Image: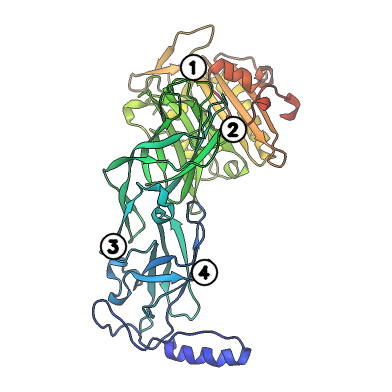
Amino acid sequence: MASVRNLKSRICFITKQVCVTIVLFSSLTLISACGSESDISTDAARVAFKATISQNGVVTSWEPGNQIGVYMTPAGKGVSNAYNSARNLCFTTASSLGQFSSDTPLTYPADESAVDFIAYYPYQANLSGTTVPIDISDQAQARQIDLLYSNNLQGRGATVSAPTLNFKHVLSEVTINISSTAGANLSTAQASLTGVPVKGTLDLTDGSVTVGSETADIPLVLSEGTTARTAKVLLLPQQGAALKLHLELEGREPIDYLFTSSATLRQDNNLQYNFNLGSSSGGGGGAGNTTVGGYLELPAIPASQLAQSNIKYITHSFSYNSKTYRSYEMLYDTNLKMAYWVAYPLCKFYTNGSTGRTDAWNYDPALNYGEQANLSRGISGYDRGHQIPSADRQVCYEANAQTFYYTNMTPQLGAGLNQSIWADLETAVRGWSSNKDTLYVVTGAMPTSPSNTSITYARDRSGQNICVPKYYFKALCYLNRSTGVAYTIAFKLDHKNYSSSDSFRNYAISVKELEELTGFTFFPTIDAQYKNSYTLSFWN
C-alpha cells in the first residue's frame, strides 16, 4: 500500500491531467490534547466529513454552525481507545450541505492502519469518558436535545475524499394529536406527559442508552389550533413505558389519560398517538379513545380499559434483512387468558416465503408466565386456534414463531370451525391481500354475547381457567391511497360447529355493526362513512 505522502503526490498529478481541483489541507503541526503522538501523521490530508441524518426526529437537516463531536480509534478497538489527539474533536458545518471540518487538524495514522470514526451531535466541549449525558426535560429546546449518533465508518483507510457519517436518532420521537369533535376550544389548552424518565446516558461504544431513575412531567409544545393541536416529544428509548397525558382546558376539569401502560419506544423511530375529546363534558370519563402507535389497523382503546391492571396492550415486531418490521398488536386480558383482538397489516411481504409452520409453541415474552395460559399441549375438546394465522407470517422464522405465542391462542372447536369455515375465511383474506398493497386486519374473540353473558372456561395444561369465546370476528379495511376511499367488511362467526356446505360469506356484516356488537372502534383513523356498509362483490 502506498504511503499517504505518495498518495498525495499521485493525486496532484492526476488532478493536473483531468483539470479537476481537489483541495487538500496540510497540517504542519499536530495539536495533541494529551501530548505528542508519533503514530499520527503530521504530513497528510486533513480529515473532513460529509454527514447525513435519518428522518425520524426533530433534527432532519443541518444548519450553518452545527457542531459534531468526533473520535478516531484504531479499527475495532472501541471509543475508549481513541487516539489521544482524536478524542471529542469539534467539527463544524458552514452550510446546510452537511460538510464538516475542524480547526484542530485530524489526520490518518502514519502507518496507514485502518481506523474507526465515532461521532455524535450536538457537540459537548466538556465531555469526559465514553458516555454522553441526556436530559429531555426541556422540549422547547428540541434541536439541542435531539441526540444523534454515528458509528458506520468502520475499518477506514486513508482517503482524500470526505467519508460520510450516517447519523441516526438516539431518542424516540412521539407525535401526539389532540382533537375535539364535540366543539371544545383547544386554543388555550395546556398539555404535559406525566412521570416520564427524563435523564439517561448514551454509550458511545455501541450507541446504547441507559435510562436513569429520575422522572418528571414534560410540558408539551403544542401547535396552534382551535379544534386540533399536535405536539412532538422526544423520549428515552425503553420497553414497558407508561405514557400518561395531562390535559387542561378552560372551563373543564383536568383530564389524565393513560395512552398505554406498556409502550416500546425504539431509537430512531416515530410513534403516533391520537387523543379525541369526543363528547365528554368534563373529567376523563368518555374522554375518548387512543390509537396507540397510530397504525391504521389498530382499534381505538378506551382509556378506562387500559387503566385496568388485567388489560395488556402488547406489540410484536421482528427483524428481517437488518430491518425491523411490525408484526401485530393485541389487547389481552390476563384474567380471561385471552386476547380480545389481534390487529395486523397483511400483504405479500408477510405471506410470501417458505418458512412454513414453525410450531414454536411458547409463552409470550411480553407477559409473565402466570398471566397467560399454558398451551404447551392441546386443550381437551378444542384446537389451539390462532387469531393471527401462521400462514399470515411466512416472511421469516421469527415472524412465524410469534404467531405460536400462547397469547395468540383460544380454545376453538376443530373440525366444524377452526379447520373448515374459519380456515376458509383465513385463506380468503390472504387471497384478498395478495392483489392489494396492504390489507388491514383485526381478528378477535369475545367472551360473551348479547344472548349469553356467562363466561365459559376450559382448562390449560397447568389447570388454569382459559376463556372459551362465544364468537369470533374479523374486520378488514383496504385504503385506496390515491383516492382516500376506504373499503371495509366484517365477519362474525358464533363458536359452534358449521356444516361443510356453509360459507363464511353468509356471515358478513358491516364494520359499524361489529362495532355496535363488540363495543370496539375499528379503524378509527378512516372516515366513519366507510364503515356503515359493505359491498360483498368487492371481496372476491
Q: Quadrant of residue 435?
A: top right
Q: Do the residues labelled 1 and 3 touch (CB within 8 Å)?
A: no
Question: Judging from the image, what secondary structure is the residue with disc 4 in?
Answer: loop
Q: Disc 4 marks which residue?
A: 95
Q: In this view, does 378 lie to the left or right of 80?
A: right
Say whether residue 38 is visible. Answer: yes
Q: Where is residue 294 in the image (x, y as percent from the top left)?
A: 52, 37
Q: Do the residues labelled 4 and 1 touch (CB within 8 Å)?
A: no
In the displayed orientation, state which residue is furthest to the top. Answer: 451
Label 2 environment density (alpha carbons within 10 Å; few <14, some 14–19, many ≥20): some
Q: Earlier in the sequence, mark 4 or mark 1?
A: 4
Mark nearest the camera among 4 and 1 is: 4
Query: Relative to 44, is 64 above or below?
Result: above
Q: Disc 1 marks which residue?
A: 469
Q: Disc 3 marks which residue?
A: 130
Amino acid identity at mark 2: Thr
Circle on res. 525? 2
Mark nearest the camera among 2 and 4 is: 4
Amino acid identity at mark 3: Thr
Q: Are marks 2 and 4 in contact (CB under 8 Å)?
A: no
Question: Judging from the image, what secondary structure is the residue with disc 2 in?
Answer: loop
The quarter of the picture where the N terminus appears is bottom left
Question: Judging from the image, what secondary structure is the residue with disc 3 in?
Answer: loop
